[in-house]
Image (cartoon, rainbow, N blue to C red):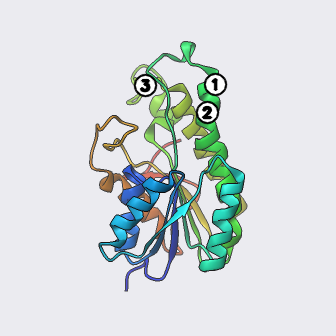
Amino acid sequence: MSEAAGKVALVTGANKGIGYATAESLARAGATVLLGARNAQAGMTAAAKLASAGLDVHFLPIDVTDRKSIEAAADRIAEDWGRLDILINNAAVSPEHGVPPSAADPDLLRLTYETNVFGLVATTQAMLPLLRAAAAGRIVNMSTGLASLKLTSGRDAPFAFSRLLAYNSSKTAVNAVTVQFANELLDTPIKVNAANPGLCATDLSNGKGRPPSEGAAVAVGLALLGEDGPTGGLYGDSGQVPW
């Protein structure tokens, strides 16, 4: 039997890109997947496509920037499934246009943090009672190597070229949020980790990179960690990524 069989998973921002690939991978592994999206038409279309392939996928409306939307999603999960085994916080935005940090628009930082950080925290808080109701909940926060201070600091750092102030710093904040929740939940069966999917061909990367399914594999692996798995870290294809 698959490790995902019988589990209920929510993936936010899952109507396309890495989120969609993650939803599909979890469903193919045997999970019941709640495909979260703020755009109802896009979400229903994506869920219907996976369901037509025989996968147990259901569209769940959720806008992570809207507290009422988050609460409604949590209420529906509680009513229809009674618990949540896996939460993949994937929803994110990157509205920047390649300007240096000195020219970054503070309003774009606020907009980015509203989804990438505040929305992630609000969603996690709302879903936590449902994760506690599961035997061993798993929370995976989608991050990036661009959030690593070690990998972006200094002239010779591998990702020093990236000057996306709002996006990169918001994901660094996601890493810190991951640690905070992991520490709070250390004495529970719940594990909280961040995933570095690498550069994948999505709208955020303008279609550059590897197939989203390869990046999704990182998140899926963390979602299906066993009892002896790690918590409170950032992980990619080759293992732990430095903060």
Q: Quadrant of residue 106?
A: top right
Residue 131 in sight = no
How many angstroms separate mark 2 from mark 1 (CA)?
Answer: 6 Å
Give the image location of residue 198, x and y in percent.
37, 44
Identify the secondary structure beneath mark 1.
helix
Give the image location of residue 51, x and y in percent.
36, 72
According to the picture, the residue beneath numbered tag 2 turns out to be 111
Q: Label 3 sits on what residue type?
A: Ala
Q: Residue at x 43, y 21 (%)?
A: 98
Nearest the viewer among 62 and 242 is: 62
Q: Residue at x 39, y 49 (%)?
A: 197
According to the picture, the residue beneath numbered tag 3 turns out to be 160
Give the image location of residue 161, x and y in percent.
40, 23
Q: Quadrant of residue 193?
A: bottom right
Direction front: furthest residue: 41
Q: Label 2 sits on what residue type?
A: Leu
Sequence-first disc among 2 and 3: 2
Is disc 1 in contact with disc 3, using a CB cutoff of under 8 Å?
no
According to the picture, the residue beneath numbered tag 1 turns out to be 107
Direction bottom: furthest residue: 1
How many angstroms separate mark 1 from mark 3 (CA)?
Answer: 24 Å
